[in-house]
């Protein structure tokens, strides 16, 4: 007889599938341009009808220029006897991203000027980049560094830095209204799991979930882009679309330890900020809501003063606050299936708030309606649960005067949005609340291609 594991350590299908997607994408050597990004996007395209855009090197995008494309085939540090002591095939973190090609015999002291280590974690390989300054380098563990004792080494980075394209993926999921939710994640890091792959996996699952919904009030736009230059490029090419973006989330660092952390948009009190704060308050005792700062992921660009979109950032322990960040220790063991799932479900709840945050009008505003007569009092659960439900009903009835949204009611009552929404639905069933006319239309399931830009 097979004994099931206790529920607390049982991995659900969704949790494992999220982790499986991270594992599938883990070996690919990505950077801000190049075939690693294309390969990643093509794999996502096997699950979602993603449009892949290619923007030529040299294209001006606001104050930036789309850089030359970088690709790498191999790299190593060899002894003069031919033994590979540092090998790109063993870890793509070994090469500083965007390293220019090199093929030389160097003295140990010359080589050391191009080596990066993490002395405080002697077995970890750091992750370094040199996108906008022509340079080359290797990242090695402190143990590897200490083992380099020969007088000379042969060094090769078989890379190409040449005119090409910046590649990003875009998916538009239409809803009943043109109002959009932007979900953005970066796809530019090599074999790092929490930083980049966790956000990609959660975004893919969110898009798949949204596509299965029978109705969507809002439209959704997913961006799979290289960090910084990708969001700047997308924004520069899509200024006309910005007025439709009502809410947005940057997704990153969603599989590592720690509670959920939401960083507010620059606006601070936007609907997405309030929705995320309400969900985290009732979701995660270890959760945290932080103010906007102009540092971090692509919310820096979405929240620049001339753009100023209502885009926040959801993570678990944020970048730079865990020692594994930007090291080889951000690996498949560091991201946990159950935490990926927890993050994914929290995102769904935040999007649920945005979907269902509408304003109702009580149909019986002259004193309280008689709830007992309608079976709405004490109709379910135990005494405490029944009282909480009654309180939610009374808050919805009291504040539904045409000026308070359901999120307003949730905030004022300190109740979860979900409990307020369920109460509103019960009151609608009994004719005590009126829905706005624009909340009743239905859209068919499916995807539309995004507009603008050349699709490849
Ligand atoms: Zn990073």
Image: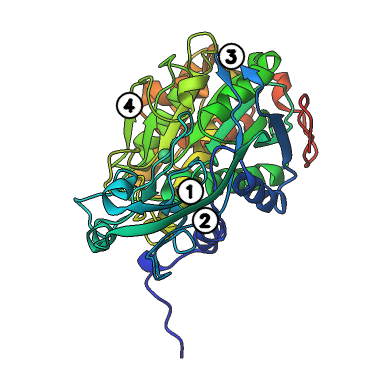
For disc 3, the marked residue is 62
Is the C-beta separation of discs 2 and 3 under 8 Å? no
Drawn side of residue 359 relative to residue 148, left or right:
right
Q: Quadrant of residue 187?
A: top right
Q: Could you tell me which secondary element the residue under label 1 belongs to?
A: helix
- Per the model, the C-alpha gap separating discs 2 and 3 is 33 Å
Q: Position of residue 121 (x, y in %)?
A: 22, 54
Residue at the (40%, 45%) spot, across then down: 137
Q: Could you tell me which secondary element the residue under label 3 belongs to?
A: loop
Q: Is mark 4 within 8 Å of ligand 1?
A: no
Q: Which mark is residue 22?
A: 2
Is the C-beta separation of discs 1 and 2 under 8 Å? yes
Discs 4/3, front: 3
Q: Which mark is residue 290?
A: 4
- Per the model, the C-alpha gap separating discs 4 and 1 is 21 Å
Discs 2/3, front: 3
Q: Is mark 3 within 8 Å of ligand 1?
A: no
Residue at the (55%, 27%) spot, across then down: 229
Q: Which comes sooner in the sequence, label 4 or label 3? A: 3
Q: Residues within 10 Å of mark 4 (few under 14, many from 20)?
A: some
For disc 1, the marked residue is 198
User: Can the viewer see residue 71?
Assistant: yes
Taking depth in this image into account, of 110 and 219 the one nearest to the observer is 110
Q: Position of residue 253 (x, y in %)?
A: 41, 43
């Amino acid at each position: 007889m097979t004994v099931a594991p206790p529920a607390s350590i049982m991995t659900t299908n969704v949790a494992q599938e999220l982790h499986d997607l991270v594992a599938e994408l883990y070996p690919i050597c990505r950077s801000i341009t190049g075939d690693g990004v294309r390969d990643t996007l093509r794999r996502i395209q096997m699950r979602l009808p993603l449009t892949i855009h290619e923007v030529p090197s040299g294209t001006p995008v606001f104050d930036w220029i789309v850089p030359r494309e970088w690709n790498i085939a191999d790299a190593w540090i060899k002894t003069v006897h031919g033994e590979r002591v540092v090998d790109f095939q063993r870890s793509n973190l070994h090469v500083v991203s965007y390293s220019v090609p090199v093929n030389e015999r160097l003295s140990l002291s010359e080589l050391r000027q191009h080596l990066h280590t993490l002395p405080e974690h002697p077995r970890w390989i750091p992750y370094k980049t040199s996108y906008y300054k022509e340079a080359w380098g290797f990242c090695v563990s402190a143990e590897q560094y200490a083992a380099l004792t020969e007088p000379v080494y042969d060094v090769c980075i078989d890379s190409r830095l040449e005119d090409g394209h910046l590649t990003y993926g875009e998916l538009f999921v239409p809803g009943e209204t043109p109002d959009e939710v932007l979900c953005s994640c970066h796809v530019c890091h090599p074999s790092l799991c929490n930083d980049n792959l966790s956000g990609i996996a959660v975004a893919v699952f969110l898009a798949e979930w949204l596509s299965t919904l029978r109705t969507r009030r809002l439209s959704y736009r997913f961006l799979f882009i290289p960090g910084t230059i990708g969001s700047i490029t997308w924004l520069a090419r899509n200024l006309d679309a910005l007025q439709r973006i009502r809410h947005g989330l940057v997704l990153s660092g969603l599989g590592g330890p720690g509670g959920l952390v939401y960083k507010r948009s620059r606006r601070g009190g936007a609907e997405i900020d309030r929705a995320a704060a309400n969900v985290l308050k009732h979701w995660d005792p270890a959760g945290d809501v932080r103010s906007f700062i102009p540092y971090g992921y692509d919310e820096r660009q979405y929240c620049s003063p001339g753009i100023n979109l209502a885009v926040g950032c959801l993570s678990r322990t944020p970048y730079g606050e865990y020692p594994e960040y930007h090291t080889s220790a951000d690996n498949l063991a560091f991201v946990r299936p159950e935490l990926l799932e927890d993050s994914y479900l929290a995102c769904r709840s935040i999007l649920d708030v945005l979907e269902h945050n509408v304003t109702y009008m009580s149909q019986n505003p002259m004193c309280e309606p008689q709830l007992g007569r309608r079976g709405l009092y004490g109709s379910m659960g135990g005494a405490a649960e029944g009282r909480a439900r009654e309180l939610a009903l009374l808050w919805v009835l009291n504040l539904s005067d045409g000026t308070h949204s359901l999120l307003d009611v949730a905030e004022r009552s300190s109740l979860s949005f979900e409990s307020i929404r369920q109460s509103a639905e019960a009151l609608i069933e009994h004719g005590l609340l009126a829905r706005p006319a624009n909340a009743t239309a239905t859209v068919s399931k499916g995807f539309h291609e995004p507009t603008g830009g050349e699709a490849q």
